[in-house]
């Protein structure tokens, strides 16, 4: 004659919580115990797999402070969103135990002519070492002298990393930057992300003890790193060097404080 027992399953984890009261045979109890053990093993395997395949992103290297001012996506076209972007007067870069204090040299909106219509693309703010004085006639000189530098952008339009990369490459070519340099090819080779309205992209440049520069790009779900001689300063030429069009010229004038 089979032995009957009362079995109650009460899993403590909320997302697997259930309460079941049934009459079962002793043999069925063994099967249930085996299934519970198997489920726990699967849960552990799933967690391990999640840790392997899920990217882990560190907190941003940059913090912003001070009373912000506002930039608005208005005044260019019927497609303007009216989105308001706040830009802060101060920033700091923290790398390990080192902290670099920066000040904003200027902020503005990058607009571009698309077909026959001018559209706002993103708002940008540029930051250099607090002790560096911006040379408005030769801003790249000031960028090169700054131990730390930040270009913070908030997008008004959706763009792919290819669109962003191609636009930046065109601006660098305009300024005589060798895009075949290994450190630049490596940097642009990591461009695999997309920007949506309201999302931010940040360029962070710092000097290394060996005299080279490290450049970090922070985008949604993506962190790109590169290093090489004048890497960050060269990329800044895409924003503060010879402009490729009127929209970038207007932005440059705002970023250097004109």
Image (cartoon, rainbow, N blue to C red):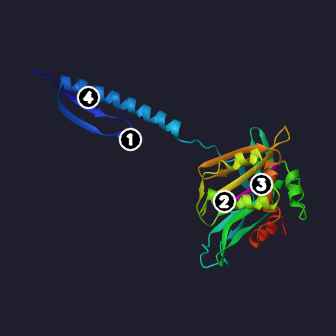
Q: Earlier in the sequence, mark 4 or mark 1?
A: 1
Which dot marks residue 14? 1
Segment tinted magenta in the rendering = 148-152
Name the spot of residue 96 as percent of width and height, x first.
74, 38
User: Label 1 near label 2: C-beta < 8 Å?
Assistant: no
Q: Is residue 54 above or below residue 179?
A: above
Nearest the viewer among 203 and 247 is: 247
Q: Earlier in the sequence, mark 1 or mark 3?
A: 1
Name the spot of residue 131 as percent of width and height, x first.
89, 53
Which dot marks residue 32? 4
Give the residue displayed 78% in from the left and 59% down from the top. 173
Q: Which residue is mark 3?
A: 235
Q: Is residue 15 above or below residue 172?
A: above
Mark 4 vs mark 2, CA separation in Å? 56 Å
Mark 1 vs mark 3, CA separation in Å? 50 Å
Q: Which residue is mark 2?
A: 164
Label 2 Cα neighbours within 10 Å, binned few <14 / some 14-19 / many ≥20: some
Residue mark closest to the camera, 4 vs 3: 3
Give the residue displayed 72% in from the left and 50% down from the top. 62
Q: Is residue 163 left or right of residue 136?
A: left
């Amino acid at each position: 004659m089979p032995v009957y027992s009362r079995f109650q399953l009460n899993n403590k984890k909320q997302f697997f919580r259930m309460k079941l009261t049934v009459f079962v045979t002793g043999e069925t109890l063994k099967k249930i115990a085996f299934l519970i053990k198997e489920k726990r093993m699967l849960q552990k395997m799933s967690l391990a797999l999640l840790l392997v395949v899920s990217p882990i992103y560190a907190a941003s290297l940059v913090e912003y402070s001070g009373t912000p001012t506002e930039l608005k996506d208005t005044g260019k076209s019927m497609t303007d969103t009216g989105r308001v972007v706040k830009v802060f007067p101060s920033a700091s870069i923290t790398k390990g135990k080192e902290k670099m204090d920066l000040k904003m040299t200027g902020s503005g909106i990058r607009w571009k002519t698309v077909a026959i219509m001018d559209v706002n693309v993103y708002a940008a703010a540029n930051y250099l070492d607090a002790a560096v004085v911006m040379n408005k006639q030769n801003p790249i000189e000031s960028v090169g002298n700054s131990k730390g530098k930040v270009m913070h952008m908030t997008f008004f339009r959706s763009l792919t990393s290819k669109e962003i990369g191609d636009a930046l490459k065109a601006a660098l070519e305009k300024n005589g930057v060798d895009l075949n340099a290994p450190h630049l090819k490596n940097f642009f080779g990591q461009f695999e992300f997309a920007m949506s309205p309201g999302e931010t992209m940040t360029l962070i440049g710092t000097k290394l003890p060996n005299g080279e520069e490290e450049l970090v790009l922070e985008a949604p779900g993506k962190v790109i790193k590169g290093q090489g001689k004048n890497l960050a300063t060269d990329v800044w030429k895409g924003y503060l060097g010879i402009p490729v069009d009127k929209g970038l010229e207007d932005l440059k004038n705002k970023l250097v404080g004109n």
